[in-house]
Amino acid sequence: TISEDRQGSGAKRKIDEFVNAAIEKSTEKTTDYIVYLACTHYGYRKQFFTASFEEKGINGRILNPNEFVVEEIFEKRGSKPRKIKNFKGVKVEFITRYRIPENALETIAYFLEDISPNTVEAFTNYTYLPGLF
């Protein structure tokens, strides 16, 4: 839903539904949760996860692994990712064993256009290798 819902209404509804289910299934009731966004797409709607927990009076500390990976990559290069706009000198390639639906390509490009034009370029011109692994 996240990768194909540019406006976000469907994604917000689904996130609310799953947050409710997670809270109901929680064995220990608390107002503090650590929320790990364990899919690359979840980070695109981080604000929906935050809002969903807040609406229920819960402090959800959101951990987005996408942010950690970017920081680690650029630390190894000796750069600070938050201060680099177009990541000059960084080549980005996107190779996948799945065909990506056009709607998903457009939506994810929308999420990334201000963050990394290089990634958008690679993603929208991805290489399809069905036998990749």
Image: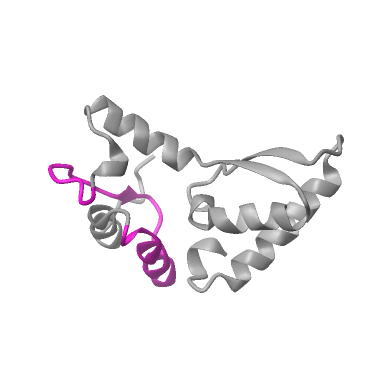
Question: Can you say which quadrant of the picture contains the N terminus?
Answer: bottom right
- Tell me the residue at 22%/28% (across/down): 77
Q: Residue furthest left?
A: 89
Does the magenta portion include 102? Answer: yes
Q: Is residue 31 left or right of residue 96?
A: right
Does the magenta portion include 107? Answer: yes
> Camera-side residue: 82 or 9?
82
Residue 108: quadrant of the picture: bottom left
- Tell me the residue at 68%/67% (across/down): 13
> Camera-side residue: 128 or 79?
79
Residue 30: quadrant of the picture: top right
Q: Is residue 43 left or right of residue 72?
A: right
Residue 68, given in percent of the width and then of the height, sits at: 43, 35
> Camera-side residue: 15 or 127?
15
- Tell me the residue at 25%/57% (across/down): 117
Residue 80: quadrant of the picture: top left
Q: Is residue 79 left or right of residue 8?
A: left
Residue 15, given in percent of the width and then of the height, sits at: 66, 59
Q: Quick check: 69 above or below 7?
A: above
Residue 25, given in percent of the width and then of the height, sits at: 84, 44
Highlighted magenta segment, given as a residue range: 85-114
Q: Quick check: 77 above or below 2?
A: above
Question: Can you say which quadrant of the picture contains the C terminus?
Answer: top left
Give the color scheme: rainbow, by chain, secondary structure or one colour: one colour
- Tell me the residue at 60%/72% (across/down): 9
